[in-house]
Every structure is written in structure tokens, then in C-alpha cells.
């Protein structure tokens, strides 16, 4: 059985690049099927990997092992560039922490990253599955996907992310382009820390999704969020020059 879930682009179209999706706490490949299909429709190769397993007593080893998993994921077969790593929750934290190492010679080193739902230092306080769902999303479809997936680890958001891992993620200064996505209704976000970290990055954009909760890639606004990601991917291919600019608008 494959360790990855792949979403190839439409037949007959040239692949425009690869998006490697890294899930967060409690999530599985199925969590990102909707996003994978949508990005693949725009001729991007999408591959979803397993969520990182973080050992709080061996953070360096955990990062090294996950870097090895990323290397395997981009090498078999060799995935087309540009390569963008897109992580959610601890997937985003792990990507950011790895980026802080500036290992530009590694096979997995990306051309850009998308960091979604970066958590703050406080653990979630959900006492039931319904409360955890409320923290994650208000999208009924996504709530159904999470509830129906027996592999989802319930209660995972109540487990604090190791502080040293968050320190490494928020102190990262990798020069590759960053798109950072946060929901303004995310109860796990620390907007002040997040804003400060994004401003310290050499090339980053912080996009706030109005009404979105922690699972910002899968909340009610998922179409607009996917469009923001595609716009970022196209801008990346255009040398970070905007493909579309607004000259005049009444809204």
C-alpha cells in the first residue's frame, strides 16, 4: 500500500509543479482529498504524506526523520518543480522548523512553502469531539469527513505542541517565499506571535481568512483559500510578480 495519496493533474496538460501536503495533529490523507483534487484540477501534482510524528524528548531526531520522509516523498518518482510544501497545524510547524535549518541542498528543499493554521503555544481545551470539531471547522462537509474517518486521532488538538519546536518554527528566517494562512476565528492561533514572525521573514505574505477556524484549508471558505494558494503558485512561477493587478474597483 502506498505511503502517499496522489492527485495527478488532468490528462493532456503539462504539470505546472508539485504541492506536497503535510497534515497536522490527528489528520490523515483523507483530510486533504478535497484540497488535493482542487489543486490538481489546475495542473499541479499534489501528494499528501503522513503527518509528522514528533517526539518531544528527541526533537532533532524527529525533524531528521521527517526530512528523510520528505526526501523519499519527492524522489520516488522524481516530482516536477517548482516544489511547494504545504503544511497545516503541526505539519506547518514542522515545515517551518525544518526551514530554519536552511538545508538548501536537500532533495526535499522547496521553492516555497504554505503554512496554514500555525498553532500558538497554548494547548487546545476541547473536552469532547464536538468541541474539537468546533475548534477545527464550521464546514459541515469537513466535519463529516473528520467524523467518518476512523483513522483520525480524536483529542489530538488538546496535546500541546512542544515549545522548542514552536520556538524553531517561529524563529525561522528561510529566504524562500512563504504564504501564511490563518483563520480569524482560530482559537488555537496566537496572532501577535504569528504576525511578528511573518514580518521577520524575508519573503512572506500573511493572509487572514475571515470566519475561518483552525482547519483553515478545510473550513467554509475552502474555495477562496484554494484560490489564494493557486494565485500564490502562479505568482511563484511568474518570479513573484503578480499575475493580476487591480487598476480600478468599486469594491
Image: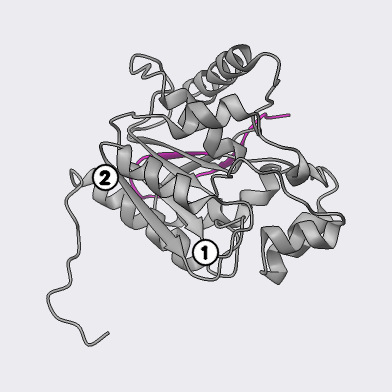
Residue 198: horizontal and vertical position, in percent? 36, 44
Against 79, is 14 above or below? below
Q: Does the image show residue 9?
A: no
Q: Is residue 211 magenta?
A: no
The magenta-colored residue range is 1-21
Q: Is residue 204 left or right of residue 115?
A: left
Foreground tag (1 vs 2): 1
Tell me which corner region of the image, top left, top right, bottom left or bottom right, holds residue 108: top left
In the image, 172 versus 29, the foreground residue is: 172
The residue positioned 71% from the left and 71% from the top of the image is 140
Residue named by callout 2: 236
Q: Residue at x 53, y 23 (%)?
A: 70
Tell me where residue 31 appears, x and y as whole percent: 67, 50
Give the left or right position of residue 224, taking residue 66 as reference.
left
Relative to 120, say whether 127 is above or below. Answer: below
* Res 110 quadrant in image: top left
Q: Residue at x 66, y 69 (%)?
A: 139
Q: Secondary structure at mark 1?
A: loop
Rendering coords of residue 85 (x, y %) = 45, 36
Disc 2 crowd rating (10 Å Cα; few below 14, some 14-19, many 20+) is: some
Which residue occupies the extreme bottom position in the image? 250
Q: Nearer the viewer, residue 123 or 103?
A: 123
Marks 1/2: CA–CA distance: 25 Å
Question: Tag 2 or tag 1, which sits nearer the N-term?
Answer: 1
Quadrant where the image shows the C terminus? bottom left
- Residue under the point 60% across and 64% down: 219
Here the colouring is one colour
Residue neighbourhood size for the residue with mark 1, other residues' Cα within 10 Å, grouped as few (<14), some (14–19), many (≥20): some
The quarter of the picture where residue 19 lies is top left
Q: Position of residue 23 (x, y in %)?
A: 62, 41
Location of mark 1 (residue) = 184
Amino acid at each position: 500500500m502506498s505511503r502517499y495519496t496522489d492527485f495527478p493533474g488532468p490528462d493532456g496538460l503539462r504539470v505546472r509543479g508539485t504541492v506536497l501536503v503535510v497534515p497536522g495533529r490527528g489528520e490523515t490523507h483523507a483530510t486533504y482529498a478535497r484540497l488535493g483534487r482542487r489543486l490538481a484540477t489546475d495542473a499541479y501534482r499534489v501528494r499528501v504524506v503522513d503527518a509528522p510524528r514528533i517526539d518531544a524528548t528527541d526533537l532533532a531526531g524527529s525533524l531528521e526523520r521527517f526530512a528523510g520522509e520528505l526526501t523519499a516523498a519527492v524522489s520516488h518518482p522524481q516530482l516536477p518543480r517548482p516544489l511547494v510544501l504545504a503544511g497545516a497545524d503541526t505539519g506547518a510547524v514542522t515545515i517551518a522548523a525544518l526551514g530554519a535549518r536552511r538545508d538548501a541542498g536537500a532533495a526535499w528543499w522547496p521553492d516555497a512553502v504554505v503554512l496554514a493554521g500555525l498553532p500558538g503555544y497554548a494547548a487546545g481545551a476541547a473536552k469532547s469531539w464536538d468541541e474539537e470539531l468546533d475548534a477545527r471547522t464550521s464546514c459541515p462537509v469537513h466535519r463529516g469527513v473528520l467524523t467518518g474517518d476512523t483513522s483520525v486521532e480524536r483529542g489530538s488538538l488538546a496535546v500541546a505542541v512542544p515549545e522548542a519546536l514552536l520556538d524553531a518554527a517561529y524563529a525561522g528566517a528561510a529566504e524562500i517565499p512563504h504564504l501564511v494562512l490563518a483563520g480569524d476565528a482560530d482559537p488555537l492561533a496566537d496572532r501577535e506571535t504569528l504576525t511578528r514572525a511573518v514580518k521577520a521573514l524575508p519573503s512572506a505574505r500573511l493572509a487572514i481568512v475571515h470566519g475561518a477556524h483552525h482547519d483553515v484549508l478545510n473550513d467554509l471558505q475552502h474555495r477562496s483559500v484554494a484560490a489564494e494558494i493557486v494565485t500564490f503558485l502562479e505568482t511563484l512561477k511568474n518570479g513573484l510578480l503578480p499575475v493580476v493587478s487591480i487598476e480600478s474597483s468599486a469594491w
